[in-house]
Image (tube, helix red, strand yellow):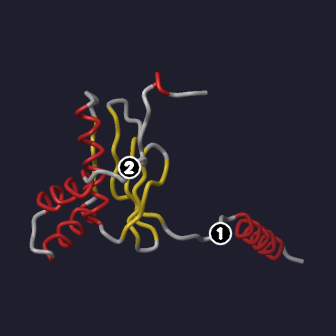
Amino acid sequence: MSINSKARRDAKKRKIAKARNAPLPGPSIEPHAELRDAQGRLLGGIVRREGEWTLGLGGRIVGGSDSAARVLALLERAADLHRRDGLEVRLGCSSALRTAANTEVAERGISFEQFQLELEKELAIDPSPGLHVVQPMSEVRH
């Protein structure tokens, strides 16, 4: 048996072992936006997975949509809310997400800023009575 034969067999074994230990191919996740605080901690972000835009805030997935404009507007709204609370935040966005959002709203014949105003109005509608109501501590009974 030649030395080259053993080297080829060993290389083949290493290749098989490497393939066996490789992670299974899953759906690709493309990061497109991130909201970070002054210390660089991730507060929220947007990814695209299997054709859907997914919004995450506070380490949790909070929603998904086919609408790039909607998830971007929601993340920008979250950034504004943090700024109103006096926190310094930085929002970074991919050109692909920005282009998709602008194209989407342009097809509706409005600007992205007009879309944001429409979304604000939609979100300002009062919830049904009894939903999302937080009682003051003095009224909580144990």
Name the image quarter holding the N terminus. bottom right
Where 40 sits versus 12, above or below?
above
- Please tell me which residue lies in front, 116 or 41: 116
Q: Quarter of the image holding residue 35?
A: top left
Q: Nearer the viewer, mark 1 or mark 2?
A: 2
> Looking at the rendering, which quadrant does residue 9 occupy?
bottom right
Give the farthest residue toward the top. Answer: 138
- Quarter of the image with the C terminus is top right
> Given contact means CB atoms under 8 Å apart, are the residues at marks 1 and 2 in contact?
no
What is the three-letter code of the residue carrying label 2? Pro
On screen, residue 8 versus residue 119, left or right, reads: right
**Which residue is at a point 25% across and 49% down the rendered structure image?**
76
Residue drawn at the location 30% of the way across and 45% of the way down: 78
Q: Residues within 10 Å of mark 1 (few under 14, many from 20)?
A: few
* First along the sequence among labels 1 and 2: 1
Q: Position of residue 133 (x, y in %)?
A: 41, 41
Residue appearing at x 46%, y 22% in the figure: 138
Q: Secondary structure at mark 2?
A: loop
Across and down, in percent, residue 131 comes to 42, 48
Please name the amino acid that badge 1 sits on. Answer: Leu
- Mark 1 vs mark 2, CA separation in Å: 47 Å
Horizontally, residue 114 falls left or right of residue 9, namely left
Q: Is residue 108 above or below residue 64?
A: below
> In this image, 11 relative to 25: left or right?
right
Determine which residue is flagged by label 2.
129
Is label 1 in a helix, a strand or a loop? loop
| Number of numbered discs overlaid on the protein picture | 2
Q: Position of residue 27 (x, y in %)?
A: 53, 70
> Percent from the top left, x then y, of residue 100?
24, 69
**Residue denoted by label 1:** 24
